[in-house]
Amino acid sequence: MSYNKKVSYFYNPDVGNFHYGPGHPMKPHRLSVIHSLVLNYGLHKKMQIYRPYRASTHDMCRFHSDEYVEFLQRVTPQNLQGYTKYLSHFNVGDDCPVFEGLFDFCSMYTGASLEGATKLNNKSCDIAINWSGGLHHAKKFEASGFCYINDIVIAILELLKYHARVLYIDIDVHHGDGVQEAFYLTDRVMTVSFHKYGNYFFPGTGDMYEIGAESGRYYSVNVPLKEGIDDASYVQVFKPCISHVMEFFQPTAIVLQCGADSLANDRLGCFSLSTKGHGECVRFVRDLNVPLLTVGGGGYTLRNVARCWTYETSLLLDEQISNELPLTEYIEYFGPDFTLHPEVVTRQDNANSKQYLEAITRHVYDNLKMIQHSPSVQMQDVPCDALPAEEDRQPEPDPDSRQNPQDMDKIVEPANEYYSGDKDQDKMDTADT
Amino acid sequence: MSRDESRRSKRCRADRDYEMGPATGIMVNDYDDERTLDEEEALEGSEDTHNELSHLQKESDMPLKDLLVMYGYGDMSCQDPNKAEDEDEDEEEEDEEEEDDEDEDDDDPASYEPDLKQFYTEMVKGEENCANVKRLSSMKAGDPTRSSESATLTLSINAHTAAASVDSKIEDGADVSGSTVADGQIVAADVASVVDSANDTPGATVDDNPGVIGGVVVGGGGGGGGGGGGSSRLLRSVSRPQSEEEEDDCDYSPDEEEWKKTIMVGSDYQAAIPEGLCKYDDALPYENEDKMLWDPCHMNEDEVEEFLDRAQLPVVKGTSLPSGIHVRDDEQALYLLLQCGYNLEEALRRRRMNALPATESVSLWSEEECHNFETGLRNYGKDFHLIQKNKVRTRSVGELVQFYYLWKKTERHDIFTYKARLEKKKYALHPGITDYMDRFLEEQEGVRDRSSSPNVHCLLYGDAKRQRTSANSASNEDQQPQVQTQVQQQQQPKSTLDNWDGAGVNATSASTLPVTTTAEAPTSTSVNSGTMDSLAVEHPHNASSPLEIGLGLETGASAIASSNAVTVTPSLPSSSSSSATAAVAAVAAAAVVAQQHQHQHQQEMSLVFKGLFKNAK
């Protein structure tokens, strides 16, 4: 079986040379380390390499408010004094400090994501990679959680020019609140986030009851998890959830946020994933064969982030790379094992019981099923003017004629997989048909 | 916008917390607030704990169905989700009525669960009152039908909260009784899931009113780890605010009001979705503003590999650096190839023409710059902006950042931190003055042991222009590859031993020539610059154990690295930074003498060292 996906990789050599300030866990320099590993593994020559476009204020304002973007553009560590009243207004300060080159940084990572989206739209590649992007907390009017400009939202908006339905998947340990909020009311973007929830964990959203609103009702999917989740448990939830999402939502493009703070021993995270487990999710999404924009995100233990995203670059290219790290100028960071997949030593137990994971998966499934009951124009692949109105009212918006067999499948599968004796679901399904 | 407001409403709510019945003891026990703790203790005292425990014990043995009935969910568990939409509306109506009623009956906690419901409604209402004015103005985005939706919100959160409290109670009970832990947890999970499947109005988050939500949201700040009073939650400070035992009973669910945030709805929050689909024009929007550096589609892989091999040749020849297991991709060579239209020969020819392609990003650092950088780091901490402004004007902030990350893993850095520690002991701290070094050192804890790693740094020590003034042996110390130990201890960079040898710089050149020239020659690979040094200092974290200094001498054109380990007392490194080139040879000689690292030699060696360095000055 040959792998013939075209991969484009967007990297600005300057993007790693920013610093959030003393003691700040976000270290843009991880991007330089990743790039160095990519080069030294010989992955560079296997993909299209771009030094990306830098996003303009105009691009940023496609999502963010003008005043906020203008503020980001103007504020510097030197003139900070003059902006004190804006700092709290835009939530700039503690988590999101003003650092030298802030706007350049934003413009680099946003431009890269935006360009990834245009390349996908233009079908000049199947997979676009921008490890510098993925800043999923940024809100329309304010910065949040180390994120200033939400490159993901801007990239999705670009994808929506060509794609009726875009799926956003977030495997950062933190909830992808900025993206979810931006698309909370629309049925053209489904956001799916797997994250630690509860116990004061940032950002405090991502309850499983957050499912979207208005037209977007059931188009926000949240999979709250507890600390310490390991590879097996994570994959046990991830795969069925994404399969269900694919089945019901049928996206024509996917944006995958690969936040690496869900890895074990992250400075801020509390999951116990290995690079392989994390990568397995990426591989799974890759194999869905839908145009894919892959972005970075969190990840606060530099060496693990670098390992993870380097490995995932190789997965997206379907290239085998050795477990032994190549010699790079950053090799010191990877001691004492100097391997790509160090053994995971977890410091905490997996607090997610099998029952809990099954329940949450079923919850996701149940909500997704509701999409059928709220038909949407957007479910047609190509908008077509001659569409008869009554088709909108059909409970099954899929234009395929295989409706009935599909329904049959849906009745069978949940009975086998998730429902143990509950009568209610049977009733519901029969009522469906 | 509504920030002040939400602070205020938070205060409103905080006051209310203290009026709550016993159930709220659970709700607030995550409050990181002394007053609340006291409050809680007081509450505990007044309760009949035995009664409650036996109660909980009973509950944990109860079948799930009974339990659900007891907490008012029995009927919902068999609800038909298909009717959800209809029932939504019913609930909405009901709830609106409820809202009207509940103003009066605040203080009558008949059981936990109504109490909780009440608590929540009341809380929301309180905030609604606080934020009422704002609400009116912010309703503009919503339409009239929305108010009923926010009623739904109340109800479903009620149910949700109640479920949460069931959950946490069960678990509390389980903890105490010991025998039923597992049961309790399963039941809890089940309760949650039953409730969720039954409760088809999960979108509890719809609300037009930023004031209300803001109140709920910001209220959590007080509990969030280091976050003070009303400040909003921080990502970096909240990672693990809780103690171990709290974690145990804080699974997915409870006490959401304390920390839960809500997704906001309104034109201030959502993105404007473009309608319909569109097409690009002939040209891609950003096509001419990016830069393609490489496209693999035009050549097959073997050809590219061959090109890369050949492209590396001229550079490698002089130094005979083995390329290692992985052939590094050379970005510039590939870009050149692309520019030459994938014409191999042309690209190679051009490459040969300027054998040392100007490395656009990185030029090597002089000792002076290194020194200034370190001084800057000492003075300002990791504020690279200040360091740049005051100490290293020759470099951009970006270059400083890049340099920092390479420098951080050198022995030079180790010496730096070690010295700083010593100075700390010598001079008393000035109280009240922010000590960046302190912070810096704290961050460095635990990252030190690199005794078994290869050490390659391409950035340190460059720039032949500048280094005439200050080539010094301290720089040598930092770059020692530590060939002997590291290669023995790990198989991975086996080939590196050869690397070091091959590129080795002889001792004479190290001492007579500027250090930096050697580093410059093989710029193309990152490996090489670690080769020209002859001293390595590797010291344990622990100041009480003696410093080990490995002295690597690379002798003559034969370029054989021979490392000698010398043990010296910890006082050594403090004197080593201001060393001069001449010292290298002398130290090396001394090292040979002291090869056997015997303990009795320690004192002597240290003296020798000191003497040498003094002389050198």
Image (cartoon, rainbow, N blue to C red):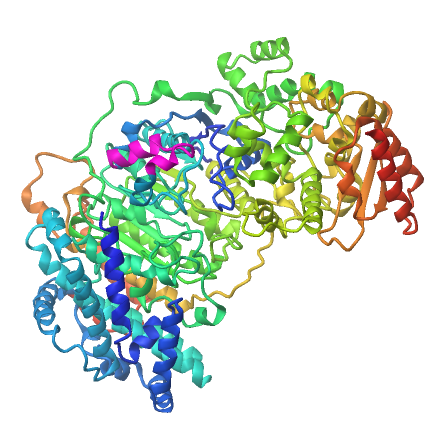
Splitting the image into 4 quarters, where does residue A303 fall? top right
Task: Pinpoint residue A5: horizontal percent, then vertical percent.
Answer: 42, 33
Above or below for B445 versus A56:
below
Between B10 and A374, the one nearer to me in the picture = B10
Magenta span contains residue A71? yes
Above or below for A276 versus A82:
below
Give the main secondary structure, helix, strand or loop, of the magenta stretch. helix
Between B98 and A430, the one nearer to me in the picture = B98
Q: Is residue B200 visible?
A: no
In screen coordinates, is A213 left or right of A128? Answer: left
Above or below for B382 versus B168:
above
Magenta span contains residue B165? no
Task: Pinpoint residue B347: horizontal percent, then vertical percent.
Answer: 56, 12
Between A96 and A26, the one nearer to me in the picture = A96
In screen coordinates, is A74 left or right of B510? Answer: left
Q: Is residue B257 visible?
A: yes
Task: Pinpoint residue A160: horizontal percent, then vertical percent.
Answer: 24, 36
Task: Pinpoint residue B571: horizontal percent, then vertical percent.
Answer: 79, 46
Between A215 and B449, the one nearer to me in the picture = B449
Q: Which residues are magenta?
A: A65-83
In screen coordinates, is B291 left or right of B333? Answer: left
Q: Residue at x 53, y 16 (%)?
A: B337
Count of labels shown? 0
Above or below for B601 versus B495:
below
Image quarter of the C terminus of chain B:
top right
In screen coordinates, is B260 left or right of B354? Answer: left
